[in-house]
Amino acid sequence: MVFKNFIKFLKEYRIIAISVAFIVSLASLNFIQSIVNDIILPILRPLFFSNSTIWEEMVLQIGSANIRIGSFLSAFLSLSIILIFLYLFVGKILRWKPKK
């Protein structure tokens, strides 16, 4: 009886689909971070910073506070690329209509 209710719960709340989506999103995150860190940042680095500067390690010091602005910008760039990808991908899916 408990097992039957558990299966009903999994189906009713689509737990399996959510789990698969979560796993795919984690894999996508690694892929997007690799694109940002290995392709985009090496292109942007010489355009905006000297070759000796690793901008991901830049720190803005205000008083005794050290603000890791480079790390923040890297995370922001990753998030922006993920959001753009999702916007384009989900937009295509929502406009897609199966052929009859």
Image: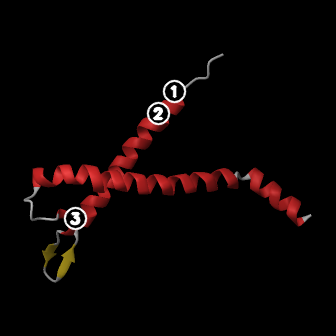
Q: Percent x, y for residue 92? A: 48, 31
**Residue tagged by mark 3?**
56
Quadrant location of the N terminus in the rendered image: bottom right
| Residue found at the very far top of the displayed protein | 100
Mark 2 lies on a secondary structure that is helix
- Left or right, 13 with respect to 95, comes to right
Q: Earlier in the sequence, mark 3 or mark 1?
A: 3
The residue mark sitting in front, 3 or 1, is 3
Q: Residue at x 7, y 59 (%)?
A: 50
- Looking at the rendered structure, the kind of residue marked 1 is Arg
- Looking at the rendered structure, the kind of residue marked 2 is Gly
- Looking at the rendered structure, the kind of residue marked 3 is Glu
**Residue tagged by mark 2?**
91
Could you tell me how far apart the alpha carbons at marks 3 and 2 are, in whole angstroms? 32 Å
- The vertical placement of 63 against 10, above or below, is below
Query: Foreground residue, 66 or 32?
Result: 32
**Residue tagged by mark 1?**
95
Q: Percent x, y for residue 46? A: 11, 53
Q: Quadrant of residue 78?
A: bottom left
- Left or right, 17 with respect to 37, comes to right
| Residue found at the very far bottom of the displayed protein | 64
Q: Residue at x 63, y 56 (%)?
A: 19
Could you tell me how far apart the alpha carbons at marks 3 and 1 are, in whole angstroms? 38 Å
Q: Residue at x 19, y 49 (%)?
A: 43
Mark 3 lies on a secondary structure that is helix
- Left or right, 3 with respect to 62, comes to right
The answer to whether mark 1 and mark 2 are in CB contact below 8 A is: yes
Mark 1 lies on a secondary structure that is helix
